[in-house]
Amino acid sequence: MKIHEYQAKDLLRAAGVPVLAGRVARTPEEAAAAFTALGTPVCAVKAQIHAGGRGKGQVKGSTQRGVELAKTADDAARIAKGLLGNTLVTIQTGPEGQVVRQVFVESGCAIDRELYCAVLVDRRVGSPVLIASTAGGMDIEEVAHNTPELILSEPFDPDRGLAGYQARLLAAKLGLPTASWRHAEAFFRKLCAAFVSLDASLLEINPLVLTKDGALVALDAKMTFDDNSLFRHKDLAALRDEAEEEPAETRASAAGLSYVKLNGTIGCLVNGAGLAMSTMDLVKYHGGEPANFLDVGGGADVKQVTEAFRIILSDPHVKAILVNIFGGIMRCTTIATAIVEASKTVGFTVPLVVRLEGTEVEEGKKILANSGTAIITADGLTDAAKKVVAAASAA
Amino acid sequence: MSILVNRDTRVICQGITGKVGEFHTRGCLDYGTRMVGGVTPGKAGETVVGLPVFNTVAEARDATGANATMIFVPPAFAADAILEAVGAGIELVIAITEGIPVLDMARVMPVVKASKSRLIGPNCPGVITPGQCKIGIMPGYIHTPGHVGVMSRSGTLTYEAVWQLTQLGHGQSTCVGLGGDPLVGSSFIDILTLFQADPDTHAILMMGEIGGSAEEEAAAFVKQHVTKPVAAFIAGRTAPPGKRMGHAGAIISGGKGTAEAKLEALRDAGIEIAESPADMGQALVRAIKRRG
């Protein structure tokens, strides 16, 4: 689960990590009032969307940037007006962009230099790590690729946390003045503790700022949570902003399905993430474009699978559907029953190609054959992909 | 011969009194696996599908001589179940459970590393040595005894590959599901090491997916240490960056973890590449032919 910058900063502040004062605004008037209330000579007005790259991002059809500085309350209102209700396109949103529904008005600070840090779980090390770099504000992936020596990394045990010496080691390597080491130690250790206590999957501070008076401040904050841990953080559920999510994806997750919307014309319904990805690959290999990734999982029942069909059919771009099931836990009979059910209750408006294999395959095929439902059956992967691509291009 | 499991492996199921645990315990029994008992705290004395239930893994081990466990405990308690199995000295711990918090696994990993236990999974289909022992949720009938070692990060994709192999007349020595989570107990390299050392495994088929760098590391290992023919498939060639494809680990971020980078590393190691998921079995056949 992703949250907004202002929400992440609230959580960081509560965890004792230094952030600047700021207020959320949903209208230009609120932005002006926020500027006045903060009482600093300069404020940043920042679009709040679930995607990075806002500073360089631009509003569709204007020169408005996703983050700009305001020197007066009127400035703040003008920038907010340029953002609110408009679509911001950044390197991470894709060309379609994302609508800005709120802005964060944040106090300015005197910046000495910009750094980078992040906490995440490193698969190779098998533990969380604190990553830091002197290349603040830049695209860190690019830094990692071109100048890996600029990326510093300290693994830590989730329960023991980051040791003081590890924080000082990073402070020294980052070239921070010795007078700031005390600040750095507190900042890094609290950041790592927040990551663990919130069960975050990513906590990125870019830029992390060294102020002119030697303190460290999180100027930006990006926080993502481990969905598997949300059951023990009921309070975090309130931070979810469904307006930022693809409606079909929200609907799918409510039904316990894993769905990702894509831009093609061939709807895919598959069991298992690896097979679902491979099915998309195969569709593309045979000249088609997948409309979605959809993993119904192993334990889905007829109701869930029927809902999966509804979600796929709600996408107006879908011209044909490919069902690819290799039954393990999932039984082919469940899928077959759901197909019959969906054809009755939802109605298939596009051709349906079905490939079944695995647990209870013969019984499943029988259910389909006896139902009279109009389906195109396929034997094997290649046959299925060719048939669905042909069906979609004929439509 | 085979790796990890064979007809002498004595298996318990942690979470045997749950619906899923019971269902798959029966499936394993039907396949011929030597299931010897189960564990659910507070349910000692009951029997499930004819097997005795114990309160703790240690009790189950002492009473049954179990040396492997299959874990179906719900996600919130699964990490603890793994620790219990490791603490009881069970040699092979196979965690099927999907959805374990990643920091729970970060707490488990060092304990497993410091022990003599081997962990497979979590979020995996399990391990099968065809005709001898099935521990997990895979459909047994698609497998045939033979000499191809199969390993994968994905369950149903493994079934697909195994089915293709079986239809091509290539049986399997052992099939290992590594698991789709960011942190798993055994890596491609761990299993490659076992396959390379197993005289009954003559060739290896591996299925990877986008995200992380496990496939690149496996490729480097194959180049240096594996003399047997290897074929590979990478799922997610068409996945767009920044979108998580079901598995917690399957995401391309910032140009890292792309299928292209993985394929390049695999090719460079002399591994035969399956161009599509329908080509996995054939790729293995090509890999064997190429070696003569």
Image: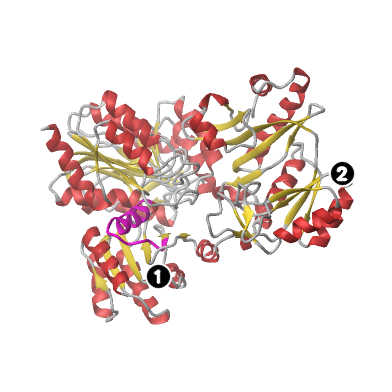
Q: Is residue B49 visible?
A: no
At 63% from the left edge and 45% from the top edge, which residue is drawn?
A223
Say which mark, if any, is on residue A318: 1
Instruction: Pick whichever, A93 or B179, lies toward us.
Output: A93
Q: Label 2 near label 1: C-beta < 8 Å?
A: no
Q: Which amino acid does label 1 sit on?
A: Val
Residue B92, compared with residue A385, is above or below; it is: above
The residue at which mark 2 appears reads as: A40
Which is more toward the observer, A342 or B65?
A342
Magenta region: which residues?
Answer: A274-292
Q: In which quarter of the image is the C terminus of chain A?
A: bottom left
Which percent across, then down, holds residue B174?
24, 39
Query: What is the x, y in percent for residue B94?
Result: 38, 40
Residue drawn 47% across the image and 72% down it: A314
Is disc 1 placed on a helix, strand or loop? loop
Disc 1 crowd, CA 10 A, few/some/many (<14, 14-19, 20+): many
